[in-house]
Image (cartoon, helix red, strand yellow):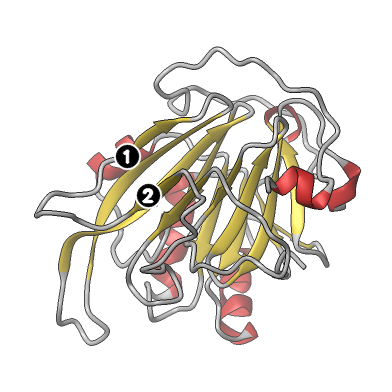
Amino acid sequence: MRLLAALALIAAPTLAQDRILSHCIAVAAGKPVVVPVALEDGLEPDSVLIRYLDHASFAIVTADGTVAVTDYTGYLGTRDVVPDVVTMNNAHDTHWTPAPDPRIPHVLKGWPADGRPAEHRLDLGSMLVRNVTTDTRGPFGEGAMRDGNSIFIFEAGGLCIGHLGHLHQIPSDEQYAAIGRLDVVMVPVDGGYTMRIQDMVGVVRRLRSSVVIPMHWFSTDSLQAFLSAMAPEFTVVETGGAQIALSLHDLPAQPTIMVLDPAWLD
């Protein structure tokens, strides 16, 4: 069952979109509004709903009902939801599953296969999903894997939405160029398992996203450390909920950190 049908998410009409390979190198222009919404409120055309599920898992939903789930672990909640595409990274078992739901048509693994880096460019019509690989390390520096992590980019509704995955390194200039523009970015802020807070702050500053959504925090201490480090430059909004709806034309003028409270699809 599709997410919209299962949750009565959207009553908006399906939109036909002319796609190009990637529009995320374009310059965005927008007006300053980001509005938290309830699932049952529906989406305006060209809006995208982002719901924080747990840890590093998000559901990204377009106005025509296309559904992507990041860092899919096999569980989304008690509702029977079948995404159109899921992405996975394999740093820990909280970022992937060896047995994804066989009904999911597209399962994108973010790590090497047969000695070759993951390379994805999946066009679903209202959503384009692509990746940029980065290297990973073991928990104590051992077991490093070249191209072991994928930053997944979701292009939908004119927005460029990035999920940094289990980022272990500051991206190179070439990697930043491949990522392109990110209007929205999900950022791990654990402070150790991925990167130190000060290094992650540098990555966020370089990306210059309009909306930053913290994820992958194990305690409020690391979350608050990240918020404190970013507060001089970013507006911090505690949404008090699990999801927000965004569109290209109402992104905030001031860079904004939107803190979401994770919730399964129950």
Quarter of the rendering containing residue 203 = bottom left
Q: Amino acid at mark 2?
A: Leu
**Foreground residue, 35 or 84?**
84
Q: What is the distance, in whole Å, between disc 1 and disc 2 at their CAs?
A: 7 Å
**Residue sitting at the far left:** 115
- Indicate the position of residue 58 as horizontal and vertical percent values: 60, 58
User: Could you tell me which residue is drawn at 49 percent across and 59 percent down?
Assistant: 101
- 81 relative to 200, above or below: above
Q: Position of residue 25 (x, y in %)?
A: 43, 26
Dot 1 falls on a residue whose secondary structure is loop
Q: Residues within 10 Å of mark 1 (few under 14, many from 20)?
A: some
Closest to the observer, 100 or 230: 100
Q: Which mark is residue 108?
A: 2
Provide residue 11's location: percent of width, then percent of height. Answer: 86, 33
Q: Amino acid at mark 1?
A: His
Q: In the rendered image, is residue 53 in sight? A: yes
> x, y percentage for residue 151?
38, 51
Residue picked out by circle 1: 120
Say above or below: 33 vs 116: above
Q: Residue at x 63, y 70 (%)?
A: 227
Q: Quadrant of the C terminus?
A: bottom right
| Residue at x 50%, y 49% (from the top left corner) | 104
Q: Furthest residue to the right?
A: 41
Describe residue 132's horizontal placement relative to residue 70 as left or right. Answer: left
Q: Disc 1 vs disc 2: Cβ atoms closer than 8 Å?
A: yes
